[in-house]
Amino acid sequence: MVDLKRYSNFRIGGQAKYFKEAKTAEEVIQTLQWAREKKLPIYILGGGTNILWSDKGFDGLVLKPDFNFIEVEDFYLTAGASVPMSKLIQAAVSRGLAGLEWAGGLPGTFGGAVYGNAGAFGGEIRDIVVEVMSLDTETMELKKRNNIECEFDYRASVFKKRGKEIILQATVKLEPGEKRILYESMMAKINYRKRRHPLEYPNIGSVFKNVPVGNLDKELADPHRLVVKTDPFPVIPAAYLIDKAGLRGVSCGGAMISPRHPNFIVNVLDAKADDVLALIELIKEKVKEKFKIQLEEEVRIIN
């Protein structure tokens, strides 16, 4: 048994019946085959920065690949999926390579960023990805995809849509830049997050996706009367909708909708998963009631 609180930025969750860290593709394959033989449910764990575990835990195998390397050749940077984004950005900036500064302060791993096409400040991971290597958990075959084959979408990719592959590593193409300017740009993003986000409490980042204006039913919601920002295309910030629904600071048990950034739910007092789930449902209900907009979770809820 392994306490899953240790593997979530939320510090919430029960216990996993089985837990395994794997450092090679072969070890991943062997572990998956073992779990299949025992007919166990399997969950592939990344950095734990956007996961809400159940209070009941996980009655199966939690597999955590550990591919932690960075290689740089000319303007191409290849890294293992387990590399923290903070480490990846530092590696690029220190070499005078531009293209990752928008991710300054972004939590999670490189693999997670590719999986969910992470984005901020007008940039997205799909803007720089050249190739991704993954393992198909059904056939146990290694796959390589170029940018187009990754089918990147708003906070999504083919890996997220299929849900049957483990990202092992990826390569991005960057551009030459001046180290000082790149460092200042990176730090500006980091400091912005420190000012605007409730990082003093355990959290898993933005709970809901922003709402693409193009997805709105014009009969239900008029974007012209709502705040719109570029992310990297026109979206209505989920935080704005939650705020206007009057939900800043609302709490349930030990969880609270952050007064500082209402698209964050924070663990202020030994919160339980059920506390967070109750707030998620409340937010969806109140935003739908006020704006006729259905919010979609960005976090992964593991029941």
Image (cartoon, helix red, strand yellow):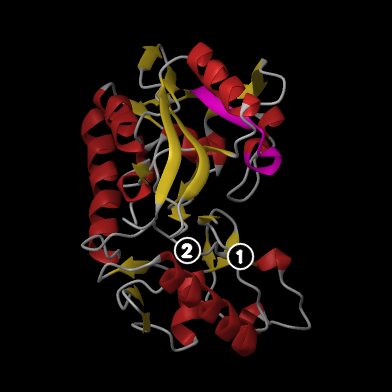
Q: Residue at x 63, y 88 (%)?
A: 289
When asked about the image quadrant of residue 147, the answer is top right
In this figure, which residue is indicated by the disc labeled 1? Answer: 296
The image position of residue 108, as x and y in percent, is 38, 42
**Mark 1 falls on what kind of element?**
loop
The label on residue 117 is: none
- Residue at 59% over, 82% down: 285
Q: Which of 180 and 281 is in front in this view?
A: 281
Residue beneath label 2, please? Answer: 207
Q: Is residue 140 above or below residue 214?
A: above
x and y, in percent, of residue 226 in the image: 57, 81
Q: Where, quadrant-wise, is the C terminus in this rendering?
A: bottom right
Quadrant of res 209: bottom right
Q: How far apart are marks 1 and 2 (CA)?
A: 9 Å
Magenta stretch: includes residue 156: no
The part of the chain drawn in magenta is 160-171
Residue 68 in picture, x, y percent from top left: 36, 22
- The three-letter code of the residue at mark 1 reads Glu
Observer able to see residue 292: yes
| Count of numbered marks | 2
